[in-house]
Each structure stands twice: as structure tokens, then as C-alpha cells.
């Protein structure tokens, strides 16, 4: 009987905008979302939450411009009892309200500023204690101008289709840029191979002359292994450890890895991992200058932590990135086994991310499925290198 009364109440409130429009007064639209006792997770498929959510999203999208301008306020009320003390009830109600608002922000395109939120440590109705209600007060004059909603829906569909076409065009452009980068890398590799083949006779003559001279502390044999750490990344609390195998005087294969796991869910957070493979060609007589190609892939979750302070202080970012490019560098010898490696890389970077903020310890999405593509610096390093194995 109580469920029948509740459904009749929802039906009456859904029909109320037409009555209020006829009377020249404002109309209230009420939607009720239910939560499991003692839980703060929002289950869209539990009870009739799914139907309530779809109806509310349709209404929000139809009046999005008026809601964003502040003409139509969206009131959110959380109700919770059964916890002790009342502060815990209000905290649970606030978390549930934020869950519902986050769902609406992510799917209807509204913002936190559109909501008027209140949380209560009482029952919503007799026997109904774990709910969040969303109410829209739509003025009658706005309802009168919405008689052509089907046309507006068609317009929204056309806009969505245009946006999808734009996204597809951007993806094609990115693929073309990637192909161009790969072709440039192949061309660089072919030029380097041609240079190496042309320099083989000269290198053989130099090596024969070098055997007659006294070896210097900076001269390495054809093969050596070195361990390294990027002091620049370490200073940004992103510990880095790598290894390089010099398979000859001129060629080195390097692999770096970076990992940090700082902070918690409610404060500053920096959770990052990166993998960076490189191929280097060492140049000139002492093989200290080098050029190479490199790539990088990783994931990140940064909020109010170094280097997150370089971004907006109240916005966090979580996503994935990859890049590819060319690099130049120089190794400064400190001793027989130690040296400093300075390098700078340039190329193409692609990042896909979600941005978010924090409200009462709960993440509120600001932007989903964002992307960033640019040409520019891909890496920079000041690394301490320890050479082991075949070094003099």
C-alpha cells in the first residue's frame, strides 16, 4: 500500500508542471533515489532508481541552458537515519547527495554551482529513511516555450552527430601525424646507418691508431653495462631507475622506469608510473655526445601534489599518456665509473585524462574523456650514471 501511495505521489508531481503552467505558477518536479541501509554507494539499477534517473536526465537536458544560467535551481536533499550520532547521519546523507550530483554532472552536463544542497538526519517520510531527492522548480513561462521539444531533441541529436564527426576527423589527423613521425624515424635510422657504413674505414683506422696510444680513463670497451637514476625526476618525488647496455662504441640501448605512490584518497595524491625505452647513437671521437629516438608510456593520478602544484590547485587529473620523439645529450665524466648524463627530448605527446575536484572527501568529476595533444619537449634529464663491467 505504501508503494502504491508513493507511485501515485510521483505521478501527481510529474503531472503538476502542466497544471501549474495553466494556472501561471511554478511547477515542481520531484525524483527520489533510494540507497541501501548503511551504504553510501549509488546503485542505478536498484529499486526504481534507473527509471527515476533517466527521467531526471531527460528533464535536465531539456532545460540545460536555463539551469546553467541559474534560472532553474536544482535542489538536492539527502535523508538518513539509523546511524548514531546525528552527525554520522548527516555525513552519510551528504556523501549520498554527492554521489547523485556526480552522476548528474557527468551525464547531463551541469555543474556543481547548479545545485542547492541540504542534508537531514530525519526520515523523508514515514518508514522512508535512506533516500536522496532531487527537485526542479520550473517556471510556467519556460514550460510554455517547450511545446516544440521534439524539434529541440532533433537539434540535440544533430549536434551530437556533428561532434562525433569532429572527433573522428581529429582521430584521423592524429593517425596521420603518427605515420609522419614513424616515417621521420625511419628516415633518421636510414641516414644513421649510411653514416655508420661510410665511417667504418675511418673508425677502423682510428682504432688501430688508438691501440698504440695510452688509453684514457674515459675510454670504454665495446660492451658495457650502466645503472642510472634521473636526479631531476627524483627531485619531483618521482623516483627513477634505469639501465643502459652499450652494445658497441656507438650504440646503446636504455630502459628507464619511474614510479611514485604518495598520498591518500582525501588529501594530496601523486600516483605515477612511466616506462621510457631509448636507442642512442654516440658521436664524435670520445663518444660523449649522442642522439637517439625514444618513447614513453605511463599512467598518472595527481591532485595537489608535486608536480600537481604546477596545475590548478583545486583540480586533479587522472589518465594515460604516451609520446615519441628524438633526443640529444652529453655525458660528463666524473671518474672511472661515474658520470653525469644531460639530455633533452622533443617530439609528439598524447594524453587522455579525467579532471576532478573534492567535495566532502568525495571526488566530483569536472571533465571526462579529455585529451591533450602537442608537439614539444617529451623529456628532460640530469642523470647520475654508474658504469660497471667492461670499463677502463
Image: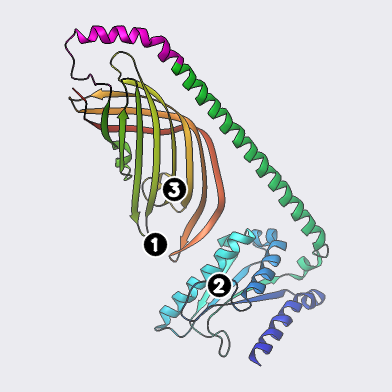
Please tell me which residue is depicted at 40% across the width and 43% down the height of the picture: 274
Q: Is residue 116 magenta?
A: no
Nearer the observer: mark 1 or 2; the answer is 2
The tag on residue 266 is 1
Q: Are marks 3 and 1 in contact (CB under 8 Å)?
A: no
In the image, is 313 to the left or to the right of 131?
left
Q: Residue at x 65, y 59 (%)?
A: 69
Q: What stretch of residues is rendered in magenta?
A: 194-222
Residue underneath mark 2: 43
Q: Earlier in the sequence, mark 1 or mark 2?
A: 2
The mark closer to the camera, 3 or 1, is 3
Residue 41: image location, x then y, percent: 50, 72
| Residue occupied by mark 3 | 299
> How far is the residue under mark 2 from the one under mark 3?
28 Å
Tell me the quadrant of the picture where the N terminus can be found.
Answer: bottom right
Other-residue count near label 2 (Cα within 10 Å), few / some / many at <14 / 14–19 / ≥20: some
Q: In the figure, 59 relative to 124: above or below?
A: above
Upstream in the sequence, badge 3 or badge 1? 1
- Measure the C-alpha gap from mark 1 to mark 2: 23 Å
Amino acid at each position: 500500500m505504501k508503494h502504491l501511495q508513493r507511485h501515485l505521489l510521483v505521478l501527481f508531481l510529474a503531472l503538476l508542471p502542466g497544471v501549474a503552467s495553466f494556472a501561471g505558477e511554478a511547477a515542481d518536479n520531484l525524483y527520489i533515489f533510494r540507497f541501501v541501509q548503511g551504504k553510501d554507494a549509488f546503485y542505478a539499477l536498484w529499486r526504481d532508481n534507473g527509471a527515476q534517473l533517466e527521467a531526471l536526465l531527460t528533464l535536465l537536458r531539456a532545460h540545460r541552458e536555463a539551469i546553467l544560467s541559474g534560472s532553474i535551481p536544482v535542489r538536492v536533499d539527502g535523508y538518513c537515519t539509523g546511524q548514531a550520532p546525528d552527525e554520522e547521519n548527516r555525513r552519510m546523507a551528504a556523501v549520498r547527495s554527492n554521489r547523485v550530483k556526480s552522476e548528474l554532472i557527468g551525464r547531463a552536463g551541469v555543474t556543481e554551482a547548479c545545485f542547492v544542497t541540504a542534508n537531514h538526519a530525519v526520515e523523508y517520510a514515514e518508514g522512508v529513511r535512506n533516500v536522496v531527492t532531487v527537485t526542479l522548480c520550473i517556471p510556467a513561462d519556460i514550460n510554455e516555450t517547450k511545446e516544440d521539444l521534439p524539434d529541440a531533441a532533433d537539434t540535440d541529436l544533430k549536434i551530437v552527430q556533428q561532434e562525433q564527426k569532429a572527433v573522428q576527423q581529429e582521430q584521423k589527423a592524429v593517425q596521420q601525424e603518427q605515420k609522419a613521425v614513424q616515417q621521420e624515424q625511419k628516415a633518421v635510422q636510414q641516414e644513421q646507418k649510411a653514416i655508420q657504413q661510410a665511417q667504418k674505414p675511418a673508425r677502423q683506422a682510428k682504432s688501430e691508431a688508438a691501440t698504440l696510444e695510452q688509453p684514457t680513463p674515459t675510454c670504454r670497451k665495446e660492451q658495457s653495462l650502466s645503472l642510472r637514476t634521473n636526479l631531476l625526476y627524483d627531485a619531483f618525488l618521482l623516483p627513477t631507475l634505469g639501465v643502459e647496455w652499450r652494445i658497441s662504441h656507438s650504440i646503446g640501448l636504455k630502459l628507464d622506469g619511474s614510479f611514485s605512490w604518495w598520498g591518500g584518497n582525501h588529501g594530496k595524491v601523486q600516483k605515477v608510473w612511466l616506462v621510457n625505452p631509448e636507442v642512442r647513437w654516440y658521436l664524435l671521437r670520445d663518444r660523449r655526445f649522442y642522439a637517439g629516438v625514444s618513447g614513453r608510456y605511463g599512467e598518472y593520478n595527481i591532485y595537489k601534489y608535486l608536480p600537481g602544484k604546477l596545475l590548478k590547485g583545486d583540480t586533479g587529473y587522472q589518465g594515460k599518456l604516451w609520446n615519441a620523439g628524438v633526443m640529444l645529450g652529453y655525458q660528463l665524466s666524473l671518474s672511472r665509473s661515474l658520470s653525469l648524463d644531460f639530455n633533452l627530448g622533443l617530439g609528439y605527446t598524447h594524453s587522455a585524462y579525467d579532471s576532478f575536484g573534492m567535495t566532502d572527501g568525495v571526488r566530483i568529476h569536472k571533465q571526462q574523456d579529455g585529451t591533450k595533444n602537442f608537439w614539444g619537449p617529451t623529456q628532460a634529464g640530469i642523470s647520475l650514471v654508474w658504469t660497471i663491467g667492461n670499463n677502463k
